[in-house]
Image: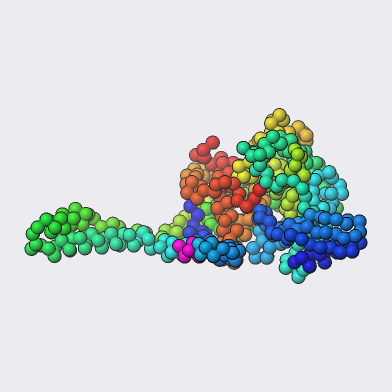
Amino acid sequence: MDEQLASTLASVFIDAEGIHVRGLAALPGGFSRETFAFDIEVQGGEHAGELPMILRKDPPAAVAILETSRLVEHNLLESLRANTSIPISRSYCAEMNPDVFGERAMIIQRMPGNGQTSDLFHDGPDTDQVDDVVRHLCEIMVELHETSIDTIDPHGELADPRGVGIDASSWDAYMDTTFEYYIDSYPTLEFDPMMLTLLDSFLSLRRNKPRPVPLSIVHGDFNPANFLYEDGKVTALIDWENTRIGDPREDLGWMALMDVLSNSQVMSHPVDEGGFLAYYNKLRGLDITPEELGYFTLFGTANIAVPVNAAIARRTRKEHMEFLHLYLVQSQAPALMSFISLLDYPGVPA
Amino acid sequence: MITSPTIDDMLEGVILAVETDILPHLADAKAQASAQMMQSLLQGVRQLLPVYESSLVEEHNAMNAALRDAAAALADVSGPEADRMRERAASLGAADDLPAPADPEQTRLAHVARATAVRDCLYDLDVMQRAGIQAADESLTILRAMLTPQYLHYMATFPMQGGMLGRG
């Protein structure tokens, strides 16, 4: 692997006299990609010195949870770096020839900062930073949502990155085609009939479409584990593979759910602004209500639930024997509680 | 409760994961042996589970009969030992046999059939609700009210504690 990495990066650092790879090690976390950390020593040329790197590899197709393109992610990262101040990794290259690393892959900059974001909450060692970090996180999300779609995605790669028939030409078209995607996908993700609360949510979402807001670039997996921080600032927003055009309230809704499931408290900060939603509303003036947040918790969760549960269903049918997918049966179960609560099932404890 | 993956599927998955994800990375001989013991124990649980309840019932009923028959064989014997044998036959051994438990696979299939029917109701109710039929709202509420304790029980029985393991 070291040789392939050095060879690939030689085509990026074309003025380097030599590239040496060190310390390649698999990283835990991240359910959809195989991630490795390593360092390179660049000898000679403009970038001479030590550079921290990440290799993000697709898993084998049978066990893939999200079918996304490393090339689209590469283009997105570079576009965001060029056009926004969002702290983000540089993407050095996307290697779309699976023969090189065994699967399609990309090499990105390893950013500084603490990724153990649970340190910010409860009795963690960095609770003194939480308000500043989450304030910055909110400001980053506002910048992402307010950046022109055409600027970030001039070739329309983010309109329907899964190729499932999403029409992002207007808010109504986006919502209607997404409802159809969710509902039509249900048979593929129903690994057990008791998943029917997902179907109930998909049908309920379609029956109760809320007011429109302008579409935007959405991160697509904005959750408490997908940022790094240091000295009261976010140093990187990470995991951009599910980014697409969508309703910005999806990012807030997904964060609200994952905040509960992760036992973190992002949505409660910054305290002096009345929490994440209040601060976001102050910055954007959209006046997103708690009811809308609840709606988009379901809607945004559905966007992840469709491919995740479809992957679990493939494992349950024993199309592959990956252990992670069995674990996901358990780890996604608390989401069902959130679903029946948000759908106002009678008898759900407050 | 979910019925797929089955409990056997989950145990099988853990055994396989120990084989492929854990054992190749264990350098310590004692740790390797412990991992293999875990696999063996889990395989034992896999084989126990499907027959455990029915075996208990069958053995319970057989012991009832044997307590009675063993005491009857001592009908002409006197003495405190034989009296205690007869006393056991007259008390525990005289109890009714336990009913045979339902076949777990039949129970699972019956559950699947009902859950599938409830799911299909959701599709039909959605059509009616979108057509403005208000009674469909009440009908959906009845189904949701039935489901609530089932999901609560599932969550309480199969809890996911400590957040999302493997993430930050």
Compare residues A43 and A280 and report the one nearer the observer.
A43
Q: How many marks?
A: 0
Compare residues B133 and B99 and report the one nearer the observer.
B99
User: Where on the picture, by quarter, is residue A224?
Assistant: top right
Which color scheme did the rendering employ for the protein?
Answer: rainbow
Residue drawn at the location 73% of the way across and 52% of the way down: A239
Q: Is residue A61 above or below residue A291?
A: below
Residue drawn at the location 69% of the way across and 51% of the way down: A178
Q: Is residue A26 something one can see in this rendering?
A: yes
Magenta span: helix, strand or loop, mainly? helix
Task: Look at the image and give the residue range highlighted in magenta.
Answer: B36-41
At which x and y percent is residue A76? 81, 53
Residue drawn at the location 88% of the way across and 56% of the way down: A47
At which x and y percent is residue A45? 91, 59
**Does the magenta segment cover residue B39?**
yes
Q: Is residue B6 above or below residue A265?
A: below
Q: Is residue B48 left or right of residue B66?
A: right
Compare residues B148 and A130 and report the one nearer the observer.
A130
Q: Is residue A267 something one can see in this rendering?
A: no
Compare residues A240 and B139 and report the one nearer the observer.
A240
Residue drawn at the location 74% of the way across and 46% of the way down: A113
**Does the magenta segment cover residue A237?**
no
Question: In which quadrant will I find the N terminus of chain A?
Answer: bottom right
